[in-house]
Amino acid sequence: MRVSPDAVLEDIKTGKFVSITGTQHTFFSLVTDLSIEVTHPDILLFPPSEDEPLLHSILKQKDMYATAMLKPMLMLGRDDRPMPVKTIPPHFAQVHEATHKDVALIFGDETDASKKYFNIGCPLDMKTPVCLDLEKLTERSNGIFGKTGTGKTFLTRLVLAGLIKNEKAVNLIFDMHSEYGLQARKEGKTQSFVKGLKTLFPDKVVIFSLDPESTRRRGGMPDVEVVIPYQAISVEDILSLEGELNLHSTALEAAYLITAKFKHDWLHQLLSNGDTIKEFAESIGAHPESIAALYRKLKRIERLPFLKPMNSGAYKHASVIDQMMEYIDKGINIVVEFGNHTSTFAYLLVANIITRRIHDMYVKKTEEFLGTQRKDLEPKKLMITIEEAHKFLNPQAARQTIFGTIAREMRKYYVSLLVVDQRPSGIDPEIISQIGTKVVAQLNDEKDIQAVLTGINNAQALRSILGSLDSKKQALLLGHAIAMPVVIQTREYDEEFYKAMGTTVTSVQIDEFMKEMF
Ligand SMILES: Nc1ncnc2c1ncn2[C@@H]1O[C@H](COP(=O)(O)OP(=O)(O)OP(=O)(O)O)[C@@H](O)[C@H]1O
Ligand SMILES: [Mg+2]
């Protein structure tokens, strides 16, 4: 596009949303790059000086100009039906800023009766909401990426609030830093807090706490205190820690040998035989060194108070997983708070144990539903949120662990993932290419940018847009749940948002309350 001499060049930014009026179609495009040009190189050698305004304005009419690179992402025919771009507008087609009507037409309207559209922000320099299609969102696994401090957690909380409010999926959130349940800190000049999901939707969210003390200190009552018996941990759960603990394959083989003999009780047996490793190894026919290595690495489990040995038989009754499943069946969302247990070790272990079992139950439920075709047996869509996703989905882990399976099977069993990560290049490329919708905030590392753009059509054009995002509260949306790639200014997570979500507690009250607590 050649920029008109009357336009204010600096108002045109990369990522801006514009429309090109062709003869038969309107092409919606993003500005991907800008440059200034001259018709003759001499102009640059002998530029008009400050006292030659006339010369300057004459040159500006024709000889000095700016061009913007546009990437058409979607086109509308005469019947206003959006379609993929298969042609180009002719010469001298006019380009305009997209109008509010355009935005609403393309991205859907939040007031739509289907309740499937959720406002997530506005295009750059505009005030009309861009909506995610929540129904499409739940059809695949999704990702929220961006380097640290760009607003990933805030974006995730927004999306989750949308899913909860409009009841488009049940959510299971592994909340490593306790930011989703009750309240979360908001960075800024003054210390302040924002509402968590339980505070916004008291009837639709329950908190499962691994650290009930910490939950209480923050003024909440956990709905359930999580205790996981050793007997519920299987070798597959330990597999997920292979990278984190630097576990050798011989140690894992030893774990299988213990399981062969002691079944469910394997971990308890291993940890209680710390002083007699040699005899223990002999009794199961394993190498003492492998057993010793396994013991050393898994000993950390004893320091996690929510993991407890229980005598066999009893563990089957008080199952946290069954409780979770009951809530999920009722459509109630679950936040698993880790409190002060913020180690990757605890996070990986617990998320794997819980997810593996929930997934097993979902597979059974789905099969039952498919077998009977009874509508009332259809499982509710479940979306599982994990932060630091590359730890779960790096190429090695993705092959072996439950999260890789879920991402690959494309919600065949009604379960999908919402992965949140600051280092997408750490995630298995095969998994990234399965991700339906991506919300990408600023990324600087070339490898990370490359990773999020794998399998995307307009990768080259989007690359420059990603490079120019603000360091906060801006994101590029692309994929299944969004009509066309677009850059947004993220919706503010504030009082107005709470109101839109239908709650009555004000943030002043929360602030006061929090100040008292700390
Ligand atoms: N939508 C929003 N509304 C209001 N404030 C926001 C929003 N997005 C980001 N912020 C501000 O940016 C800060 C950082 O956001 P956030 O904690 O979500 O970053 P992050 O990407 O999750 O960082 P980390 O990788 O460290 O977890 C917030 O504390 C808040 O002040
Ligand atoms: Mg975060």
Image: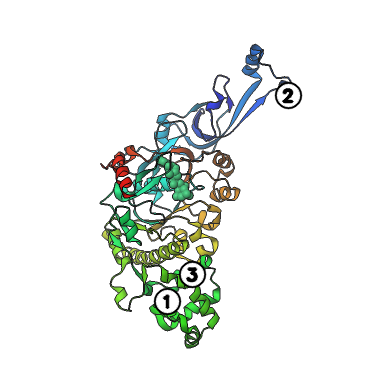
Distance from disc 1 to disc 3, alpha carbons, whole Å, reads: 14 Å
Q: Nearer the viewer, residue 74 or 417?
A: 417
Residue carrying label 3: 239
Q: Identity of the amino acid at label 2?
A: Pro
Residue carrying label 2: 41
Lateral position of residue 58 relative to residue 263, left or right: right
Distance from disc 2 to disc 1, alpha carbons, whole Å, reads: 76 Å
Residue 39 in sight here: yes
Residue carrying label 1: 267
Marks 1 and 3: CB-CB under 8 Å?
no
Lateral position of residue 308 relative to residue 125, left or right: left
Residue 481 in sight here: no
The answer to which of marks 3 and 2 sits earlier in the sequence is 2
| Scheme of image coloration | rainbow
Tell me if residue 73 comes above or below residue 20 in the rendering: below
> Is the distance from the Cβ of mark 2 to the nearest ligand 1 atom less than 8 Å?
no
Please state which of the two labelled residues, at mark 3 or mark 2, is closer to the viewer: 3
The answer to which of marks 2 and 1 sits earlier in the sequence is 2
Give residue 395's quadrant in the image: bottom right
- For the point 43% across and 66% down, the residue is 349
Q: Identity of the amino acid at label 1?
A: Leu
Tell me if residue 78 comes above or below residue 266 in the rendering: above
